[in-house]
């Protein structure tokens, strides 16, 4: 039994390194060698030796001995012992196997089991007892536990306090990214503008490993926006520079795209009327000319109508067919950020904190009660609904409308909806580079408040996992259309994890302006010469080579993806995929009369919609039934046809189709792990085949182009993580023993409920003052 | 459904598909004929009706009733709807409305099917059209009650594979390494005189004589003595099955039965206790004492340990399945899907079975067989590469469990099938399946010898089998074919194509060279050479 109580003396010699014996002498030099691997700018603030890291839930026999350190970046457990029971470790280059970045810590619980006390440690708090145990609850659903039975009581206490202190910084500039980037600038004084370009802000899409050397556009510059306009063929739109130097708004990017017919002067005047001066921002244009635009509310009631009309007219003018604008008010249709956060907290509680067996019986209704899936579904559903007209176009009807998303500040749910719409409608955003550029465009640059929403400073009531909600909704699409995405679910999970590493500038700030302002201040305080650079260049998360080796990055690739290059076979014949030319009729015949006169609101078009997905208790998509709407036949027809994976993909949003993203939420739960199973086993098999096809394809090209020997170099590259070792390997090779439903992650060492004697950890989380799991302890005393 | 007013076009592709499928299955579908017919199938009647489609509303059509199926073809120009329902699937036929019923389509028939569907037909009130249809349907849907043969005995389909040969008990026992030192094959039940519901060949402990078996049989319900189902190829532990002991209220004991179980235990010397899994909930086992049954008590069976698996009886299961139907047909309970699903307890029953007993191979027409297939499906979801067959295989089995087209699932035991000469007079379902194997194969299957699966029987992983339970609803229909499988098949075809072209190119290249070709002439020879550069 793995227990909180100190082992009985008779067992001591089996469980603990006997402190006074030769063993200790042997182990001492060993422990001295245990040095942390530190990043530039990283310093150890406290450490303690002879710490036991708990591995299994019901026994201490696998526990590891080592040193626990707290740095200004992470908590690190350093040991010479190999991880028991673990068959695979997906290594993050920034972190050791047992490390947790400080920004990933959710809660710190210290326990003294002799005194039967426990305390949730906040910043600058006192600890009246010497902890015998430390439990770290991580934001990524892990639970890590250390015991200090053999450590110096004072140093154990100090480390706990240090972790509490450093993981809950009082100021943004205390986040490690600043120290790291500052050091990089100092170390590379000779280099122009600090960081060598390799890990600079540019951040390659090269990150994803083999293949593309393309870079992810960050949309920090005029030219990135200009290219996006050209890529989408959006005539009637221009890049606007009035916010250069953040002169207009501190929560807008310096460059953004507006209707060509709106002059800078007008925009400047209008901007005062918008919440946060967030005027309309162009997101994307459909190839038929319909645009997707987002903006904040107009706070000035008097001018509201007038400005609204001007904006809509301008959008209409920018449309090649002068089509109308469809307005979608997200505040009225989606759950608010607090509701999403509440759902997430419940989901997490259910997935990792509640006892596994006890939640089995009521699992489905408990899952339903979290409302997380409902929100994922509503998000998907809303997107599906808010775009009926562009879809209808696609489905050979003639409604060609631009869409205007409005939200109070226009920087929360707008990010979710705007980006999800683009994932569904534009295959470019289903590639790795495209998806990354989408996150840059609709989240980072559009001022999604990552700092507050991720709660990096741990004191914000504004925490809300909207970004995860978007990733989850994307996963639903990936699950339904596995061949439509260049990336895998591992990529999505790793991307989510990356929001918890305070090293990248990408997910650290509330707005681009905040980065510039804060990092300029920091640079001045540290005597860093910025030259003409706008703020420090933090590493970009898109530079995946910072986190993963080239080989490990290949796991981001989805072997099911039908890209443009590898041709595909239908009925035995090889065809190349071409982006289908869409035939849109340019006339407006068949349009309901109501649509012909300017702006149309949700209510007019979809009379029942609000009653259907309104909070707090949104109805499910029985709304589709709205008898009046003539779009259902189109949707039906769309679903009845084979999907063009390089065109629109629509989610199926029935309750039976929206699923729990198990890899993300169950990967650290040992009891839920399917050993040698899970969809990864099919993924593995397909990867082998895809790799074999790649090799054969290259051989074919070589055969055509000349002697075999000429291109051997090329053969070394593979898009696939799993590679065929010989011809027809796919037919014969078995499932590698390290595969499991958690792959590439491993739940080993993550402590779920039973590890602490059946006390529901929920009781810890609710911050109970007294050690509640007294059953066993009391028995011993 | 409120959406019923919408287009009827394309919404019934599944039903369409089923007919296309059946034509591929070897049905001689003469396109000029109004209804597809199997060899041996005869048309009984046809009638114009209104089919009240639960998804699309009333559709005018012509219904054809044969001695095998009910077939409906839409008479409306904008609808391609086709219904094709084997009569064996029907569990109940009811009349709805009376002669004085008013309102549109309120007079007709309501047909309940075992495959989760309900069919409603509205008929004209004049004449005896409904009575005729009701009587014909009743007669042919429940032929045994009307002294008619089951369709399986009339079916004249021919396949190039004989499915009746797929299972030969002697060969199967040989595959398992039986008989061996501890286990023997006995012919004691050759004429089913020991136990009429057991097969003719039984595997029993070597040390138990036929006389022992007869004495044990007296103490087991319906004489179903413990017999071997499966033996582990390496450690030789066994799975043995039997019925409940006849303990009764007085707690009767039987020395022979006790000894027999101990003999079984001794066949594996490492085991100090024989583990008995009683599939029932313990309450039921206790209650069964009142009717002469019971369970193996600790006092009587010292070297055995008894566990109750808590699997509910078929009545509970049937109730549960009925609840599943309530939430999925015709409309899926969307607003509280997960809690509604939970309240059916269906997945819970699946989970229990997944935990333990897999011995329910009764071809009984109870949901137990359905649950077994569901469990297999759940496992195939958890281990996508471990099964040679695909989902379609499982669905086909369930469809023909009820269809009465094949003899495979007819009657309750081997003796009854033998009496009826089922193997001579009917076609086996496995003939259909094995003559069209590719269709039922899982492309991801990886053959791994002696691989043991450890499924996670947790509600976190169990799912409702949408493609079976909700397949009639066009709204819920999953993508067909499965995109993952489809992609794999495409890549396989591409691989073969590339190999072919490589061979061609190499042939052409070597022909161009005047010197004798030094490069390998086929990709299969060349590949290993190339592969070393990886």
Image (cartoon, coloured by chain):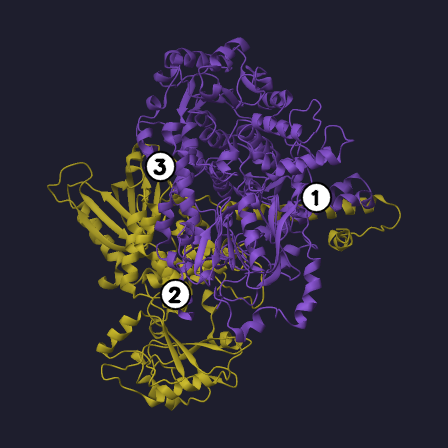
Chain colours: A purple, B yellow
Position of B379 compared to B154: left or right? right
Badge 3 local density, few (<14 within 10 Å), some, or many (20+)? Answer: many
Task: Name the disc covering residue A778, or none.
Answer: none
Residue sitting at x 67%, y 52% = A36
Up/down of A603 relative to A10, above or below: above
Q: Earlier in the sequence, mark 2 or mark 1?
A: 1
Check if mark 3 and mark 1 are on a common chain. yes
Q: Are marks 2 and 3 on the same chain?
A: yes
Q: Residues within 10 Å of mark 2 (few under 14, many from 20)?
A: few
Residue drawn at (30%, 48%) of the image: B327
Quadrant of res A219: top right
Q: Which residue is mark 1?
A: A697
Chain containing the residue with disc 1: A
The image position of residue B487, as x and y in percent, is: 56, 45
Q: Position of residue B360 (x, y in %)?
A: 38, 68
Which chain does the residue under circle 3 lie in? A
Please state, as top left, top right, bottom left or bottom right, where the C terminus of chain A lies in the image. bottom left
Q: From the viewer's perspective, is B533 left or right of B165?
A: right
Calculate the distance from the C-alpha at mark 2 to the C-alpha at mark 1. 65 Å
**Residue A132: percent from the left, percent from the top?**
51, 60
Question: Where does label 3 land, which residue?
Answer: A621
Do tag 3 and tag 1 residues touch (Cβ < 8 Å)?
Answer: no
- Label 2 vs label 3, nearer the camera: 2
Give the number of the mark in front: 3 or 1: 3
The chain letter for the residue carrying disc 2 is: A
Q: Residue furthest left?
A: B100
Position of A76 compared to A780: left or right? right
Q: Nearer the viewer, residue A574 or A298?
A: A298
**Residue denoted by label 2:** A775
């Amino acid at each position: 039994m793995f227990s909180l109580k100190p082992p009985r003396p008779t067992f001591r010699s089996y469980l603990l390194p006997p402190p006074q014996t030769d063993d200790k002498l042997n182990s001492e030099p060993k422990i001295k060698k245990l040095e942390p691997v530190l990043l530039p700018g990283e310093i150890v603030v406290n450490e303690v030796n002879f710490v036991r890291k708990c591995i299994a839930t019901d026994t201490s026999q696998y526990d590891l001995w080592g040193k626990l350190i707290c740095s200004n970046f992470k908590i690190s457990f350093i040991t010479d012992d190999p991880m028991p029971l673990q068959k695979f470790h997906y290594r993050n280059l920034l972190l050791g196997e047992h490390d947790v970045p400080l920004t990933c810590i959710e809660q710190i619980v210290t326990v003294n089991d002799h005194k039967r006390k426990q305390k949730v440690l906040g910043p600058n708090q006192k600890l009246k007892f010497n902890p015998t145990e430390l439990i770290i609850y991580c934001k990524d659903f892990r639970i890590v536990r250390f015991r200090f039975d053999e450590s110096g009581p004072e140093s154990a206490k100090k480390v706990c306090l240090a972790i509490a202190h450093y993981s809950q910084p009082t100021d943004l500039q205390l986040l490690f990214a600043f120290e790291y980037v500052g050091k990089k600038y100092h170390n590379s004084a000779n280099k122009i503008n600090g960081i060598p370009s390799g890990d600079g802000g540019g951040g390659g899409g090269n990150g994803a490993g083999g293949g593309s050397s393309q870079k992810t556009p960050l949309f920090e510059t005029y030219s990135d926006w200009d290219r996006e306009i050209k890529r989408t063929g959006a005539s009637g739109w221009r890049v606007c520079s009035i916010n250069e130097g953040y002169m207009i708004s501190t929560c807008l990017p310096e460059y953004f795209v507006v209707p060509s017919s709106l002059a800078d002067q007008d925009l400047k005047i209008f901007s005062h009327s918008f919440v946060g001066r967030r005027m309309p921002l162009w997101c994307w244009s459909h190839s038929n000319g319909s645009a997707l635009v987002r903006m904040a509310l107009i706070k000035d009631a008097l001018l509201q109508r007038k400005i609204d009309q001007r904006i809509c007219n301008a959008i209409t003018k920018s449309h090649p067919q002068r089509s109308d604008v469809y307005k979608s008010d997200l505040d009225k249709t989606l759950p608010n950020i607090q509701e999403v956060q509440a759902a997430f907290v419940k989901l997490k509680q259910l997935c990792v904190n509640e006892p596994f067996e006890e939640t089995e019986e009521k699992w489905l209704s408990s899952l339903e009660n979290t409302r997380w899936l409902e929100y994922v579904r509503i998000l998907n559903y809303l997107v599906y609904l808010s775009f009926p007209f562009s879809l209808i176009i696609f489905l050979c009807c003639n409604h060609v409308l631009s869409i205007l998303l409005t939200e109070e500040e226009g920087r929360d749910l707008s990010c979710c909806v705007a980006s999800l719409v683009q994932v569904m409608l534009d295959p470019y955003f289903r590639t790795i580079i495209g998806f990354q550029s989408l996150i840059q465009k609709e989240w980072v640059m559009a001022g999604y408040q990552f700092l507050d929403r991720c709660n990096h400073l741990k004191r914000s009531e504004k925490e809300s996992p909207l970004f995860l909600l978007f990733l989850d909704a994307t996963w639903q699409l990936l699950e339904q259309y596995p061949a439509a995405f260049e990336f895998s679910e591992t990529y999505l999970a790793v991307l989510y994890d990356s929001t918890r590493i305070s090293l990248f500038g990408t997910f650290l700030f509330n707005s681009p302006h905040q980065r510039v302002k804060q990092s300029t201040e920091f640079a001045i305080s540290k005597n860093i010469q910025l030259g003409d650079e706008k703020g420090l260049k933090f590493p970009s998360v898109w530079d995946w080579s910072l986190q993963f080796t080239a080989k490990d990055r290949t796991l981001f690739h989805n072997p099911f993806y039908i890209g443009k290059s590898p041709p595909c076979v239908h009925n035995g014949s090889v065809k190349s995929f071409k982006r289908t030319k869409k035939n849109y009729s340019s006339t407006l015949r068949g349009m309901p009369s109501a649509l012909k006169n300017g702006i149309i609101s949700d209510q007019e078009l979809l009379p029942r919609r609000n009653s259907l997905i309104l909070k707090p208790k949104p109805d499910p998509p029985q709304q589709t039934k709205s008898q009046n709407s003539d779009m259902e036949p189109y949707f039906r027809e769309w679903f009845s046809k084979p999907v063009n994976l390089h065109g629109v993909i629509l989610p199926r949003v029935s309750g039976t189709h929206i699923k729990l993203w198990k890899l993300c939420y169950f990967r650290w739960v040992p009891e839920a792990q399917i050993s040698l199973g899970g969809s990864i086993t099919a993924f593995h098999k397909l990867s082998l085949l895809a790799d074999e096809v790649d090799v054969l394809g290259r051989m074919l090209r070589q055969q055509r182009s000349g002697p075999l020997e000429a291109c051997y170099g090329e053969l070394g590259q593979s898009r696939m993580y799993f590679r065929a070792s010989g011809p027809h390997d796919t037919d014969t090779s078995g499932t590698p023993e390290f595969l499991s439903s958690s792959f590439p992650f491993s739940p080993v060492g993550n402590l779920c409920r039973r590890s602490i004697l059946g006390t529901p950890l929920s009781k810890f989380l609710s911050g109970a003052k007294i050690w509640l799991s007294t059953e066993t302890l009391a028995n011993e005393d | 459904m409120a959406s019923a007013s919408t287009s009827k076009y394309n919404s019934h592709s599944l039903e369409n598909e089923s007919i296309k499928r059946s034509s591929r299955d070897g049905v001689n579908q003469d396109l000029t004929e109004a209804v597809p017919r199997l060899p041996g199938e005869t048309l009984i009647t046809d009638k114009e009706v209104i089919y009240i489609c639960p998804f699309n509303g009333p559709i005018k059509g012509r219904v054809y009733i044969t001695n095998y199926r009910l077939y409906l073809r839409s008479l409306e120009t904008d609808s391609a709807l086709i219904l094709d329902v084997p009569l064996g699937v029907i569990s109940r036929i009811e009349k709805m409305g009376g002669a004085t019923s008013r309102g549109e389509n309120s007079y007709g028939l309501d047909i309940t099917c075992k495959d989760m569907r309900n069919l409603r037909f509205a008929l004209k009130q004049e004449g005896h059209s409904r009575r005729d249809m009701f009587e014909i349907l009743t007669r042919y849907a429940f032929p045994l009650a009307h002294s008619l043969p089951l369709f399986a005995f009339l079916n004249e389909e021919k396949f190039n594979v004989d499915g009746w040969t797929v299972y030969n008990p002697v060969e199967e026992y040989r595959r398992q390494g039986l008989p061996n030192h501890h286990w023997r094959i006995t012919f004691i039940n050759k004429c089913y005189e020991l136990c009429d519901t057991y097969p003719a060949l039984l595997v029993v402990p070597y040390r138990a004589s036929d006389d022992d078996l007869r004495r044990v049989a007296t103490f087991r319900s319906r004489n179903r003595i413990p017999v071997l189902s499966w033996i582990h190829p390496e450690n030789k532990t066994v799975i043995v099955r039997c019925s409940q002991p006849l303990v009764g209220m007085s707690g009767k004991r039987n020395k022979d039965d006790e000894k027999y179980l101990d003999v079984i235990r001794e066949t594996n010397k490492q085991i100090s206790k024989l583990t008995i899994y009683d599939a029932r909930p313990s309450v039921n086992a206790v209650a069964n004492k009142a009717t002469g049954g019971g369970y193996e008590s600790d006092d009587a069976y010292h070297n055995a340990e008894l566990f109750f698996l808590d699997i509910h009886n078929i009545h509970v299961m049937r109730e549960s399945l009925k609840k599943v139907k309530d939430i999925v047909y015709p409309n899926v309970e969307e607003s509280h899907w997960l809690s509604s699903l939970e309240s059916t307890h269906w997945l819970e029953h699946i989970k229990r079975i997944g935990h333990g007993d897999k011995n329910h191979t009764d071809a009984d027409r109870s949901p137990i067989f359905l649950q077994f297939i569901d469990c297999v499906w759940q496992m195939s979801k958890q281990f996508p590469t471990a099964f040679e067959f695909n989902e379609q295989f499982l669905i086909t089995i369930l469809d023909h469990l009820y269809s009465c087209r094949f003899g495979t699932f007819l009657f309750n035991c081997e003796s009854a099938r033998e009496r009826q000469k089922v193997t001579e007079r009917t076609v086996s379902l496995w003939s259909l399946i094995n003559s069209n194997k590719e269709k039922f194969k899982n492309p991801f299957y990886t053959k791994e010898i002696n691989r043991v699966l450890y499924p996670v029987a947790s509600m976190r992983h169990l799912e409702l089998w949408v493609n079976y339970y909700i397949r009639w609803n066009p709204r819920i229909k999953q993508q067909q074919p499965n995109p993952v499988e489809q992609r794999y098949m495409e890549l396989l075809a591409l691989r073969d194509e590339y190999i072919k072209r490589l061979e061609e190119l190499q042939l052409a290249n070597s022909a161009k060279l005047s010197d004798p070709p030094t490069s390998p002439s086929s990709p299969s020879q060349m590949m290993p050479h190339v592969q070393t550069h990886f």
